[in-house]
Image (spheres, rainbow, N blue to C red):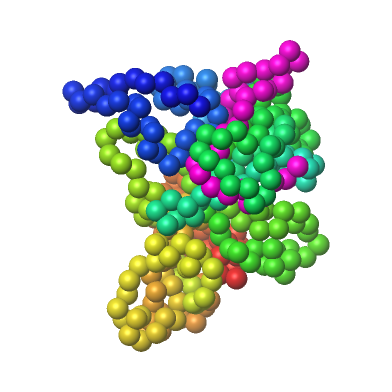
């Protein structure tokens, strides 16, 4: 993609966009960059309907009056063919390896979608591109940032098809919850189908791509993915009596040091979760530091964060007492399987 050179003024300092943007690990997945244009959000986001605000196309608890999670950005099309179908190229957000391509739209509400693995600062991040009309890459293929990988479309298995006017790319940036997801799903979801193995959307917990893309292109400071993860706002803190689950190795930079556990042995982990259930701090704990015998214990809840972002329903308050919900327990079971 051709880079347009311009200068940004901030605090009296000029920054060259050619120098600033060329070194960022995450790029926009389409040519639509209107996210930068304050007040022009409707040029970037595709809301769920014309009478809904642009925020319904953004990340978070943005649908069903704040009770439905949307784990990505719905990026509006810019170009169509003579039939009104979107023709925008979809681009890899960063260097990586294609892990999965679903070419059967009837098997997912994502429609046709692609998952790509990226490693930034030793951290694995998985980008997902959904509702494609066609993919031009295959699983196992290495790709470069800004490389065309698909064409935007409107595919989905939902009863109501995506209108031409709101044709968009659904774009996610995720952590992978568990390498053993397919086995866990088969054991815990009897009678249900999993057509996508480890690349089922349930196994990908999203981060807000808007925060990452805007932070990535800020001239104020260099973006750090590790620092971004570590600075997530805590919804709750739990103790899990499990010591050997894949997330610990896959996201080793998020595992903290505890000399007591090093000395006495690790009996479990104290884990901080954000409101979308992303584990962003994992502290090993010795047996002497864990009270109770339950496999999962809820230690604390950030009530203000729950009020602001309740849609994943991981915890619930009964009187003055907070407890893990079935959804919260299921997420922890999946994480530690």
Relative to 281, is 24 above or below? Answer: above
Outermost residue, bottom side: 264
Residue 90 colored magenta? yes
- For the point 68% across and 37% down, the residue is 136
Residue 81 colored magenta? yes
Taking the image as shown, residue 2 lies to the left or right of residue 85, namely: left
Instruction: Tell me residue 118's x, y (percent).
Output: 51, 50
Q: Where is the C terminus found, in terms of image quarters?
A: bottom right
- For the point 78% across and 46% down, the residue is 107
Q: Which residue range is magenta in the image?
A: 74-103
- For the point 30% across and 41% down, the residue is 222
Taking the image as shown, residue 100 lies to the left or right of residue 15, namely: right
**Viewer-nearest residue: 292 or 108:** 108
- For the point 43% across and 51% down, the residue is 120
Relative to 236, is 126 above or below? Answer: above
Whether residue 307 appears in this view of the structure is yes
**Viewer-nearest residue: 292 or 188:** 188
**Viewer-nearest residue: 249 or 62:** 249
Instruction: Tell me residue 253's x, y (percent).
Output: 39, 62
Instruction: Tell me residue 200's x, y (percent).
Output: 67, 53
Relative to 113, is 242 above or below? Answer: below
How many marks on residues? 0
């Amino acid at each position: 993609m051709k880079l347009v050179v311009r200068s940004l003024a901030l605090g009296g300092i000029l920054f060259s966009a050619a120098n600033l943007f060329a070194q960022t690990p995450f790029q926009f997945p389409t040519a639509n960059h209107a996210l930068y244009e304050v007040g022009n959000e409707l040029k970037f986001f595709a809301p769920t309907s014309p009478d809904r605000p642009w925020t319904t196309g953004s990340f978070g608890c943005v649908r069903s009056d704040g009770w439905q999670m949307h784990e990505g950005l719905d990026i509006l099309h810019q170009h169509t063919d003579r039939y009104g179908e979107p023709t925008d190229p979809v681009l890899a957000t960063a260097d990586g390896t294609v892990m999965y391509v679903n070419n059967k739209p009837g098997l997912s509400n994502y429609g046709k979608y692609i998952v790509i693995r990226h490693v930034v600062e030793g951290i694995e991040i998985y980008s997902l591109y959904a509702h494609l009309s066609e993919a031009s890459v295959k699983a196992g293929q290495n790709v470069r940032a800004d490389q065309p990988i698909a064409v935007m479309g409107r595919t989905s298995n939902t009863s109501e098809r995506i209108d031409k006017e709101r044709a968009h790319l659904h774009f996610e940036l995720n952590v992978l919850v568990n390498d053993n997801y397919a086995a866990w799903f088969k054991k815990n979801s009897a009678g249900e189908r999993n057509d996508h193995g480890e690349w089922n959307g349930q196994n990908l917990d999203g981060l807000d791509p808007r925060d990452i893309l805007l932070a990535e292109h800020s001239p104020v400071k260099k973006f750090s993915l590790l620092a971004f993860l570590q600075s997530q706002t805590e919804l709750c803190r739990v103790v899990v009596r499990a010591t050997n689950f894949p997330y610990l190795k896959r996201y080793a930079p998020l595992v903290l040091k505890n000399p007591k556990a090093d000395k006495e042995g690790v009996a479990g982990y104290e884990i901080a979760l954000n409101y979308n259930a992303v584990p962003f701090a994992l502290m090993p704990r010795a047996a002497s530091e864990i009270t109770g015998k339950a496999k999962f214990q809820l230690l604390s809840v950030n009530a203000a964060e729950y009020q602001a972002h309740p849609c994943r329903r991981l915890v619930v308050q009964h009187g003055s007492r907070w407890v893990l919900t079935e959804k919260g327990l299921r997420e922890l079971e999946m994480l530690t399987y």
